[in-house]
Image (cartoon, rainbow, N blue to C red):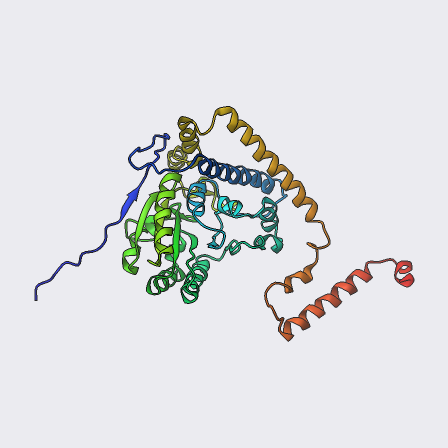
């Protein structure tokens, strides 16, 4: 028998709005002005919040955190297609999408200041909290999608991960299970080209992350991750397929991390200044803003007003967070036992009581003798 070539799907690259804000009219999607404004508003809100958080961290008012600047187009261009009943499973650079889904700025600030209360999803919203352990959230997303199929629910799960996470075993297991069971999962890869300090060229031999979809038997596409219109189009198609029961999709958004990996990182040790300048010109907000102005969706004065409104929201949220962080509720370490089990196992109950007794003893020891005897 002669050798026969196996016909495999081709991987496409999609870009609609270039770095100068010039749109490809043939590929331009039909998006209402209200939705265009919504996309830009939450992208701007995420960017300004991210920038303000960096200032706070440098001032010692916030803990170490990973910035999301540069990733707004991937987050908002995709999440806007989800219904409230769909599931949103983020990693840790999806600030724009989290705000759109109803998470408050306050909760984001609390979380990165070390308060687990900031990880509590808004009431009635099908979101999982920010996930710092690399790639573990993809297994959760695949499981949710498989559960939807078992219950015959026509929902969608959208989950996010970085290029570094694409090298983790959890990623491969999640995609394989989702494909085998035709789970309605959209896998969004934020390929910012560095797994902390490791460049993509040292992570894999293949040209794109998107082509890995072929191995799992699902559609895959690479998009310009700084082009919110391209992300919008690719994700719309993936969500429609998932909702019709046609299984998962892998979307690779090619972008760049304009900031350090976290606020504890120094990217100058592994990235050149020329590379950073090149990619900074391609950033998502500038090109989208130009597109909206050229299209007449916004006027300059309206954008100035929007920026002022956004800054006021952030300022108010910071004030609320810093006041709340001194409240008795957030200063109560016993709360750590309250949210893991529906029915607390006996050994944890014992530990909780032991800690409660220790805290009470410590509290009483700090009081004056007169106060203690009076009590």
Image-quadrant location for residue 149: bottom left
Residue depicted at 47% across the width and 28% down the height: 298
Above or below 338: residue 33: above
Image location (x, y in percent) of residue 199: 37, 47
Residue 192 shows in this picture: yes
34 or 90: nearer the viewer: 34
Image location (x, y in percent) of residue 52: 57, 38
Residue, far left: 1
- Left of 278 or right of it: where is 340? right
Residue, far bottom: 346
- Left of 266 or right of it: where is 230? left
Residue depicted at 40% across the width and 45% down the height: 192
Image location (x, y in percent) of residue 232: 38, 43
Residue 227 shows in this picture: no
Q: How many badges with numbers are in the image? A: 0
Image location (x, y in percent) of residue 223: 33, 44
Q: Quadrant of the N terminus?
A: bottom left
57 or 289: nearer the viewer: 289
Image-quadrant location for residue 229: top left
Q: Quadrant of the C terminus?
A: bottom right
- Left of 241 or right of it: where is 196? right
Above or below 226: residue 137: below
């Amino acid at each position: 028998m002669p050798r026969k070539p196996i016909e495999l799907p081709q991987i496409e690259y999609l870009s609609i709005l270039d770095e100068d804000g010039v749109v490809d009219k043939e590929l331009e999607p039909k998006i209402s002005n209200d939705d265009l404004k919504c996309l830009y508003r939450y992208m701007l809100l995420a960017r300004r919040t991210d920038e303000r958080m960096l200032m706070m961290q440098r001032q010692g008012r916030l803990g170490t955190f990973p910035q999301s600047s540069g990733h707004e187009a991937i987050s908002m261009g995709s999440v806007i297609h989800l219904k409230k009943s769909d599931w949103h499973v983020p990693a840790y650079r999806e600030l724009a999408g989290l705000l759109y889904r109803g998470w408050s700025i306050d909760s984001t600030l609390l979380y990165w200041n070390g308060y687990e209360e900031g990880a509590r999803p808004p009431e009635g919203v099908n979101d999982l909290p920010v996930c710092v352990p690399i790639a573990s959230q993809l297994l959760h997303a695949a499981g949710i999608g498989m559960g939807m199929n078992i219950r015959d629910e026509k929902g969608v799960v959208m989950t996010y991960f970085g290029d570094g996470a694409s090298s983790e075993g959890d990623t491969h297991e999640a995609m394989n299970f989702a494909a085998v069971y035709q789970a309605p999962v959209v896998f969004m890869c934020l390929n910012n080209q560095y797994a902390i300090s490791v460049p993509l060229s040292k992570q894999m031999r293949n040209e794109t992350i998107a082509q890995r979809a072929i191995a799992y038997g699902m559609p895959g596409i690479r998009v310009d991750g700084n082009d919110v219109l391209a992300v919008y189009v690719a994700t719309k198609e993936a969500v429609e397929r998932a909702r019709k029961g046609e299984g998962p999709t892998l979307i690779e958004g090619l972008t760049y991390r304009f900031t350090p990996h976290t606020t504890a990182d120094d990217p100058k040790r592994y990235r050149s200044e020329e590379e950073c300048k090149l990619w900074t010109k391609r950033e998502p907000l500038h090109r989208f803003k130009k597109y909206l102005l050229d299209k007449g969706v916004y006027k300059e004065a309206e954008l100035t007003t929007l920026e002022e409104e956004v800054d006021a929201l952030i300022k108010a949220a910071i004030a609320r967070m810093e006041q709340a962080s001194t409240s008795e509720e957030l200063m109560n370490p016993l709360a750590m036992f309250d949210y893991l089990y529906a029915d607390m196992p006996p050994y944890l109950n014992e530990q909780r009581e032991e800690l409660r007794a220790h805290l009470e003893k410590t509290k009483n020891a700090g009081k004056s003798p007169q106060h203690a005897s009076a009590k």
